[in-house]
Image: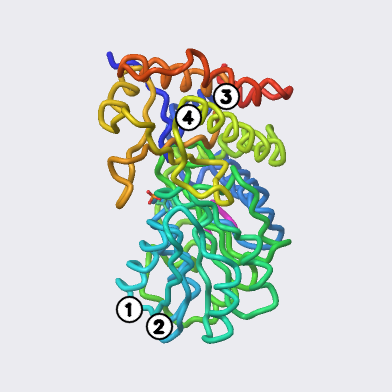
Amino acid sequence: MQREKLLMIPGPTPVHPRIVQTLSLPTVSHVSPVMVSEMKEGLANLKKIAFCERGEPFVIAGAGTLAMEMALLNTVEKGERFLVLSQGYFGQRMVQISQSFGLDCDVIQSSWGEAVRPEELEKKLSEEKYTAVVSTHVDTATGACAPVKDYARILKEKPPFFIVDGVCATGGIEERMDDWGIDVILTAAQKCLGVPPGLALLVLSEAAMKKRKRMKSIPAYYSDLLNWLPIMKDPSKYFSTPCVNEIRAFTEGTRIVMEEGLTRRFQRHNQVARALRAALEALGFSFFTRKPFLADTLTVASYPQGVEDKPFRSTLNQNGIVVAGGLGETAGKVFRMGHMGNLSFSQVYFALEGVEKTLTTLGYSFKPQAGIVAASKILENSDEQGVSHV
Ligand SMILES: *Cc1c(COP(=O)(O)O)cnc(C)c1O
C-alpha cells in the first residue's frame, strides 16, 4: 500500500478528512431535497468567499480552465476586444482560449516573476477601448501575485469588465468583488478551497450577468451560463446532471472556510507563507519571484549551489512530500511549493523536516534545524494552529 503523501503542489492541495468523508456518502438524486439544500448552501458560501452580495454564483463540473473559458464566452462577444494582463503561464492560456473562439485580445506581458504594473494598465486603457480586462491573481508558474486591488481601482468607474482568474487565490487571498468592483471571479475546487479537483467555480456581478443577457447567442452550450442560471437559483431543476458527490464535498469545504473565518484564513495563509520562506531562506534557497510580488499561496524557490532539481524533488517525494517542478523557462531550476487551502501548522513542520532530511541525504551542508527554527519563530508567534486535520 502506498503511503499517503503531503501534497504541497499548486493544486490539488491536501484534502481535509471531513471532505473525504463527505465524498464517500451514497450518491443521491441530483434533484433530491438534500442535494438542493447542500448546493444552495455551497453557492451562498461561494458568494461570501468572493465578498459578493448580489451577483450570481455557479458551480459546474469541470476545472479551472473551464471556468476561464466560461468567464470569457459569457461576457465578451465576437468583434469586441479584451485585454489580458499576463503574469506568466495562465495569462497565456487566456490568449489561447480567445484564439480558439476567434475573440480579439491584446496582452500586456510582465517579466516572469513580476506582475503587470497598474500604470501600464492605465496607459493601455487610454489608448484602446476594451470590453473586458482579465488578470490572473496569482500565477502558478512564477508565484507572482498581481495587484488586483490596484487594477480594480483603475477599472472601477470605467466600462471594461474586470475578470479575475483566482484559481490560485480565491479563498486564500482577499478578493472583494463588490467593494473593489470585480465583475467575474473564477476559480476551481482543488486549490485554495482544498476540495478534490472536478469543479469550475464562478461568481458574476449583476453587471456581468446583464451583459450575458444582452448577448444574443454565444459559441457555447454547456458553457452557457444562461443554461445554468435556473439550476443555480433552484437546484431542483435540471439542465445537465451535476456531480452530486463532488458538489457536497465542495459545500463541506466551504463550511470549513466559514468556520475558520475569511479574515483568519487569509492571515493564516500569509503567516504560513512567511514561515516557509523564512525556513527556505535559512537553508540557502532563494526565490524566483521578485519580492513585492511574493504570493501567500505559493512559493517558487531556486536551489542553492550544489542542490539539483531532480534528486531534490524525488528524494523529497520519498520522504512523503510532493512539490512541483518549474514550468517553461524555470524548468529544472526551481521547485514550486503550494501552501494553500487547509494546511495545518504540523503539516508545515512535516514539510520542512522533509526538506531538511532531503538536503542531508543529498550531502548538502547546512545548520541542522535552521529551517524549522526560522519557521517556528513565525508560526509560534500566534494562537493559530492552522486547520486541524483530526
Ligand atoms: C491551476 C490554475 C488554472 C487551471 O486550472 P485547472 O483546474 O488545472 O484547469 C488556471 N489559472 C490559475 C491561476 C491556476 O493556478
Nearer to us in this view, 20 or 286: 286
Mark 4, residue position: 15
| Whole-number angstrom distance, CA of label 4 to CA of label 2 | 40 Å
Which mark, by number, is residue 78?
2
Q: Helix or strand or loop: what does disc 3 sit on? A: loop
Residue 136 in the image: state x and y as whole percent.
49, 58
- Nearest the eye: 225 or 164: 164
* Residue at mark 3: 344
- Asked whether the beta carbons under mark 1 and mark 2 sit within 8 Å of each other, the answer is yes
What secondary structure characterizes most of the magenta part? Answer: helix
Mark 2 or mark 4, which is nearer the start of the sequence?
4
Disc 2 marks a residue whose amino acid type is: Lys
Answer few, some or many: residues within 10 Å of disc 3's Cα (few below 14, many 20 plus, some between 14 and 19).
many
As drawn, 219 above or below 285: below
Residue 248 among magenta residues: no
Residue 295 appears in view? yes
Q: Earlier in the sequence, mark 1 or mark 3?
A: 1
Q: Residue at x 48, y 67 (%)?
A: 85
The answer to which of 159 and 356 lies nearer the viewer is 356
Kind of element beneath mark 1? loop
The amino acid type, in three-letter code, at marker 1 is Gly
Q: Is residue 129 left or right of residue 154?
A: left
* Horizontal and vertical percent position of residue 163: 54, 65
Question: Mark 4 is on which residue type?
Answer: Val
Q: Residues within 10 Å of mark 1 (few under 14, many from 20)?
A: few
Instruction: Mark 1 or mark 2: name the one nearer the start of the chain.
Output: 2
Residue pictured at 46% horizontal, 70% vertical:
84
